[in-house]
Amino acid sequence: MVLHAPPPARKAAPKPRRLSADGEIDASAYTSAEALYRDQWNWDKVVKGTCNQADCIAACTLNLFVKDGIVWREEQNAIYEPSGEHLPDFNPRGCQKGMVYADLMYDATRIKYPMKRVGERGSGKWERISWDEALTTIADKVLDVATTTGPASIVYDMGTTNIDFGPGTPAQFRLTSLIGTTSLDEWASVGDLPMGAIQTWGLFNTDGTSDDYCNSDYIMIWLGNPAYTRIPDMHFMLESRYKGAQIVMIAPDYNPTTMHTDLWVNLRVATDAAFALGVAKVMIDEKLYKAAYVREQTDLPMLVRSDDQRFLRQSDVTEGGSEAIFYFWDAKKKKIVEAPGSQGAPTASIALDGISPALEGSYTVTLKDGSSVTVRPLWEKLQDQLLDYTPEKVQAITGVHADVVRKVARDYAKAKAASIFASWGACKHYHMDLFQRSMILISALAGHTGKQGGGLRIGAWWNMPLTYDKGQLALIGQAPAPDQRPKVRDIENIMKQMSRGMSSSAPTMAYLYAHDEGYRKVVNNMKFQDPALPQTVAEYAKEAFDNNWMPVGPKPRMMLFTSMNPLRRWPAPHVIREGFWESLELIAVWEFRMSSSAMQSDIILPAAGWHEKAGIKFCQSLVPYICVGEEAVKPLYESHSEFDIMAMLATKIQERAIEREEGTYLDAQGNVHDPKRFYDDWSLNGEFNEGDDTKALDVSISHSQPLKGVSWKEISEKGAVRVKNPGSYGPITAICSDMEDGEALAPLKWFIDNKEAWPTLTGRQQFYLDHPWYLNAGEGLPVHKENPNGGGDYPIEVTGGHTRHSIHAIFRANKTLLNLQRGEPVLYMSTRDALERDIKDHDLVWVHNDVGGYKVHAKPTPALQPGQAVIYHAWEPYQFADWSSSQTVVAGAFKPLHMLGGYGHLDFRPIHGQPSHTPRAQKVEIEKIVS
């Protein structure tokens, strides 16, 4: 097939503008349906665009057809090339959401001008105001709060909905950093924080390019639904299957992806860890594991004391020894030897260099005080624990037949390259860390992690610098030679130190727990907590706060947020709305559409839409391209880009600070902030001003590691440019591999091929957490635990799901996409559960538990297990009766073990080491509403 560029625009007679002076569409010139059809092939220009501020991971470049000042329609821009001759290309990229954004630009939800609330919050009473009045109100409140109770009393929530790689997000980061606000962690608050990966690898997420699935001969889709969530990328899995790969779906429900797989493992809800541990048991019993890989790459050969069940440390053996140096038993030398590469070791290499770590045996070691202790390799302790996970015992837990457990274990272990598509489905469960630790365990046993076409895949991003400061870019933009590249562990340690000394980021769930009494009561409800824990949430939280493991800052007084929707996604939003939210003195948002949270704010600033500003798409590593969008039309109505809004707000704060004769103030870390210089500092003394967004983009693009030397002009003309180099490790860039010509990108090769130490306490894939919190909870090693009764003891678990028809809530009210559904929220439930409750298709039901409830129409389906229900995410609260959304049954009783800090790699930094929002598998009852 030959792909052609769009034909040039036809010459047409002048027609009246279809956009009025106030931004409204004037349709009067279109006299008939026939004229409308003919005119769609008459455009004025074609502009490159993308969904440049959507938290969509696809990165699709589009052709935007503009006519009479209106974005008429979008089409896919098929410019992607294959990574190698043996691999398919990345065309086509796009989905139904991207194809209707031009409708969303002009629909009834659009915010057109600044407004302030004149009634009670949520009353819907607004007054149109000028930009100057809106900015002055916000600026004065910023100064009032910052100079009295401190800038940390201003809370900023960026979320993940409205994020880009420039210039909007960097502009916001820059101003909020200058102010010194408390920034809520966006990943934990949406439930996407992969704590199991953090605990085991020390890494936040990891992934490669999606064409690497074509190098897999065995693919597990685990708690995922890529037919909905990876529309432009799922074809790589299907093409791999066409070439002979097996695809296995592991999920309790028969979701839309399952029909494309070879085996459906329909385990009971939230028993994923048990299934994985059963697979591990078979692999070990049948000697299907890679012993050399286990010895070098994991902590399983490390010695564990039999008395206190902790790793044997140098500090146990030698006076003044390190707490972060560990031991093997060298089978050749018949003595303990220090494990190379651990966090306290002098080198960051895990190469064994002649050491022969024993996996089995019991040994006696003399301690520094002259006493002796028995030690065993962790491998033996793992085998002891796996006695509880024979295939027959796993069948009793999961409902999956023992023969299926054995089949999956054998096929997975014998595969040349087996991958696990995990994404963020597991992250939203209470015991998601146990799920992921167990998945990573079987991947390590089989030696698939760090292999082409192998390993657990969650997500990673290209290392684009979120800054337009040339001084910083001079450092960030250099892609060092492999032998000069900073080690991942060193960068992680620096980031943690910086988050303590310079950052005012806060772990969202701990922050809400600390500052909302109502939510704290919900979380502290003993009925919702894990009965297997030896302490209550309150006791864990007190220790974490006392040790400053979870920095939550002072009582908030003011909130700023941007095009995201906290009252839609936070747990128990009706509780938080009456507590934390109502206690805030001012809530201001910049947003392009009227969301449920914007409706509950005080000041609204109209932000430009995606096609009304230039920007870099928030790009995941799935596609080896950086995508950008040009300004197709000028910002509609009175809207401005986020870059310009930040320039205007910085200007206004500086003006008001000078007029009020404000001095400098300190933040909680002792950093000095001078509001009389906010605009000067934000703009680098006038180098980047309002309207200079493309100038900032050119600097960012040309200095980036993936696109070193490419200009904004070049990339904006094409719409996307291929990535040249993943770059160094960064906060969200856990690729940890180099690109190879003619091949897909597989993650984590630095650790396998280069023997680089993992950024964990032990320097290896760490399956054992020997901190007292984890040991006392019985979670030193991965284990299966039953899901707590989140919301109370009720018979049905709502597992949720990621919607196909919206990117978060952005498109939830779009008429075109609503026409592809039922037009309103719907709950899917098991046919058997529906029969028992006399519930028929589209009956109105009451879904409730001890936290709250909501009304919704039901759809019985045989695709769900009895005891399971699904409501796809992101419905706006205003789409439910009484604004009582599906989140009202979510207790948000986070796992308190994740508040641990000060233990090696387990310490808080932004998007790392903290409790996460876990809305899945909440317990409810469903009752038919009889009118």
Image: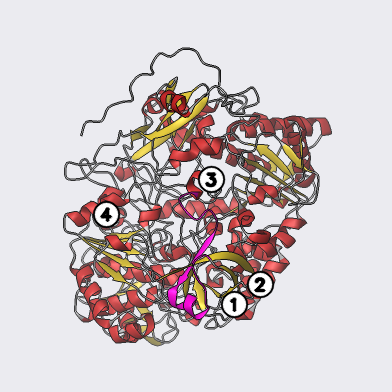
Residue beneath label 2, please? 522
SS category of the residue bearing label 2: helix
Q: Is residue 684 magenta?
A: no
| Label 1–label 2 contact, CB within 8 A | yes
Residue beneath label 1, please? 528
Residue 587 locus on image (x, y percent): 72, 48
SS category of the residue bearing label 1: helix
Q: How many marks?
A: 4
Q: Tell me, what colour scheme is on the image?
A: secondary structure
The one nearer the camera, 368 or 478, is 478
Residue beneath label 3, please? 814
Residue 343 lies in what quarter of the image?
bottom left
Residue sitting at 41 percent across and 85 percent down? 370
SS category of the residue bearing label 4: helix
Against 657, residue 813 (above or below) is below
Residue 760 lies in what quarter of the image?
bottom left
Quadrant of the frame with the N terminus = top left
The one nearer the camera, 639 or 384, is 639
| Residue type at tag 1 | Phe
| Label 4–label 2 contact, CB within 8 A | no
Residue 670 locus on image (x, y percent): 68, 49
Q: CA distance from mark 1 to mark 4?
A: 39 Å
Decide which of tag 1 and tag 2 comes sooner along the chain.
Answer: 2
Q: CA distance from mark 1 to mark 2?
A: 8 Å
Q: CA distance from mark 3 to mark 4?
A: 30 Å
Residue beneath label 4, please? 237
Decide which of tag 4 and tag 2 comes sooner along the chain.
Answer: 4
* Numbered tag placed on residue 679 in the rendering: none
